[in-house]
Amino acid sequence: MTTARRPSLVDQVRQGLLDDLVAGKLVTGDKLPNEDRLADRFGVSRATVREAVLGLLEAGYLTRRHGSGTYVTKAPRSRHALDTTVSYTAMIREAGHTPGETVISKALREPTPFEAEQLVLGAGEPLLEVERVRLAGSRPVIYSRDRIPAALLDGIAQDALDSSLYVILETAGHPVSRASAELIPTLADDKLSELLEVECGTPLLHIDQVDYDARGRAVMLSLEWHVADAFELIVNRRASPGPADS
Amino acid sequence: MTTARRPSLVDQVRQGLLDDLVAGKLVTGDKLPNEDRLADRFGVSRATVREAVLGLLEAGYLTRRHGSGTYVTKAPRSRHALDTTVSYTAMIREAGHTPGETVISKALREPTPFEAEQLVLGAGEPLLEVERVRLAGSRPVIYSRDRIPAALLDGIAQDALDSSLYVILETAGHPVSRASAELIPTLADDKLSELLEVECGTPLLHIDQVDYDARGRAVMLSLEWHVADAFELIVNRRASPGPADS
DNA sequence: GAGTGGTCTAGACCACCGT
DNA sequence: CGGTGGTCTAGACCACTCC
């Protein structure tokens, strides 16, 4: 685990409500007690309740209707969707398969000018490139090529390099906090068809992604090719808030 | 515009900070005044400042570092990305093209069993299906097939049916608040190649989407086929919050 | 009009960062 | 250590929904 601390009151309230949901005490369409009552029940202020509920709203469990009440959503929540998750291992497992991976190559090399610019690398600073094929059971589903500045991995034990790149980046003090991904439908060429065990010309989803840490520094570049029908790639979209955006 | 009311204090503060950003008073890496000072400057409480900043954090403009300060992000924010926007017209315009559309068909028909289940349609309840091709300049970029329960459109003037489907749904009292989209790379078949003016076998991104209103009711089903290189399809991903999710 | 969520305040104390 | 954001409170008033 990365963070193990005393849960905040907000967390406790959120967990309490979540427990009711999974226990079936609250089911689809049910109306929650109003905020004052929830505040009483959990022994916290209304502001605390509101923040807890806010989390559940964003997660898609609840809906608020001004002047009416707060209701349990008709849970169409797709977990491990593209917009919230970064671990493909979890995605594959969630889809009911056994995740696996084959590391094709792992090497330090000079960055291209583009990579150096994206990752803000000084002259001569190398990067680590990891080339992998992810498996669902025995079937290849994703081919990826990830690049991380070698400087970020200085203090990292050599054998730790075998764990998830996200874990590595976190250990290095640069946990990935968000990413921007471009989606490009494409076709399997000779190399990809061999790696992913599909026919040449099979449609694939190519994802070109940049991962950023909390400081806004680009810490990893990823290129991925996904087999179309291996598992569902979902994006949960939200209506533009209106007040915030232009 | 759909909502035009007095902006809240939170909105005013957010806009004030946003103005500083676009005016260049605040640039990448700059540290913001602390929350107490911002509260003074805008004449509001610290809680209000925090909520305004929260919006800018989520939008990717700012980063907070506990114990250190709040900083301007190295703006990698992609506007009109798939996860936040629902209007393709705006997306196309943002990409520097003139948006346009050709309506291929617009008709009431019986739902299939699948559609009836998804949209919670009673027996015999028809739906409206709109088939369109979106244009960037004169180039076709998206072919879409949208289906809405006809019952939702009862009070809607006939000529209003020409505006955006999202506007129509809002008028009908069912504004779309979120959507779930599945992404499927595919190939242009004969029909699609003709509609989108690409060669047969060209890679396309197929999006199968369900739109929900604030009550969690499915109000529209959309099938879309996007030309790959027409404009960038971006997804902004966030790390799982940790406290909230499991 | 009663009940609900939406906004806002003034103040307190805690936890973390840097010097 | 001082400064920063993180959490929390108790209360006030507003805006919306629904009976």
Image (cartoon, coloured by chain):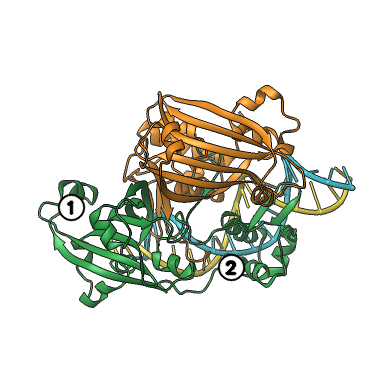
Chain colours: A orange, B green, C cyan, D yellow
- Mark earlier in primary sequence (2, 1): 2
Asked whether the residues under marks 2 and 1 belong to the same chain, the reply is: yes
Disc 1 element = loop
Where, by quadrant of the figure, is residue B45 drawn?
bottom right
Residue B58 at x, y percent in the picture: 57, 54
Left or right: A120 as drawn, with respect to A54: right
Q: Quadrant of residue B146?
A: bottom left
Which sits in the foreground, B243 or A32? B243
Q: Residue B232, relative to residue A221: is it above or below?
A: below
Judge from the rendering whether residue B161 lies leftward or rightward of residue A6; answer left or right. left
Pointer 1 residue: B121
Q: Please identify the quarter of the rendering in which residue B49 is found.
A: bottom right
Q: Chain of mark 2?
A: B
Look at mark 2 in the image and give the residue it sits on.
Answer: B9
Q: Of discs 2 and 1, which sits in the foreground? A: 1
> Mark 2: which amino acid?
Leu
Depth check, front residue: B162 or B103: B103
Q: Is residue A92 visible?
A: yes
From this viewpoint, is residue B213 visible? Answer: no
